[in-house]
Image (cartoon, helix red, strand yellow):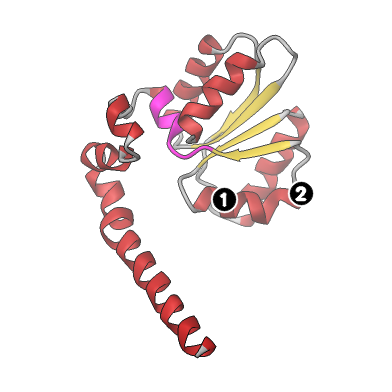
Amino acid sequence: MVGTDFVPEMFQATADRGYSYFMLGADEATIPVAADYARRSFPGWELSGYRHGYLTDGRITSATIEQINATRPDVLLVGMGNPIQEEWIRRNLPRLDVPVCMGIGGLFDYWAGNVSRAPRWLRRLGHEWVWRFFQQPRQKARRYLIGNPLFLARVLREKATNRNRIS
């Protein structure tokens, strides 16, 4: 299950238990709209804060971590896209005072209405990326048309290298 499906289900299943969340990611125009949507859609959770995900240097990152820690959220939702969000969490986890940190991909763009979800049948097939590609060709072209084939080539090269070592 992807973050765009999991987070709403988690919020609904655990509403009214006193949990709070912080939203980190998207751009300056998108994140407040997504935060407003989340506030309205998940009343059983408290939005402790939000910030856009363009952390351009160490000083800004440190200030953002201080802001997150000061609000003491139970869950930090990081929406910077893969693999940037996972790398950001890994690098900064020791400095974060948050029990749960989750990379959630494009969830904030959905919540803000910037992009729509793929039809359910396409999601079930595991091809939501095709839908996203046609909605955001500039942003997704590099990842899907260059990044994915490059990744596959690296996997095949590594597999061949390991096979030669075993022989």
Residue 39 in view: yes
**Residue at (43% x, 36% y) in the render:** 106
Label 1 or label 2, whichever lies nearer to me, is 1
Position of residue 91 in the picture relative to residue 106 (left or right): right
Q: Residues within 10 Å of mark 1 (few under 14, many from 20)?
A: some
Image position, residue 1 (x, y; %): 49, 34
Q: Looking at the image, tell me whether mark 1 or mark 2 is earlier in sequence order.
A: 1
Q: Is residue 85 above or below residue 166?
A: above
Residue located at (71% from left, 49% from top): 93
Q: Is residue 134 left or right of residue 153?
A: left
Residue 23 placement, left or right of 62 = left
Q: Which amino acid, mark 1?
A: Glu
Q: Nearer the viewer, residue 162 or 145?
A: 162
Q: Which residue is under mark 2?
A: 95
Q: Secondary structure at mark 2?
A: helix
Q: Which element is circle 1 on? A: helix
The secondary structure making up most of the magenta span is helix
Asked whether the viewer can see residue 29, the reply is: no
- Per the rendered image, the range of residues in magenta is 104-111
Mark 1 sits on what residue?
86
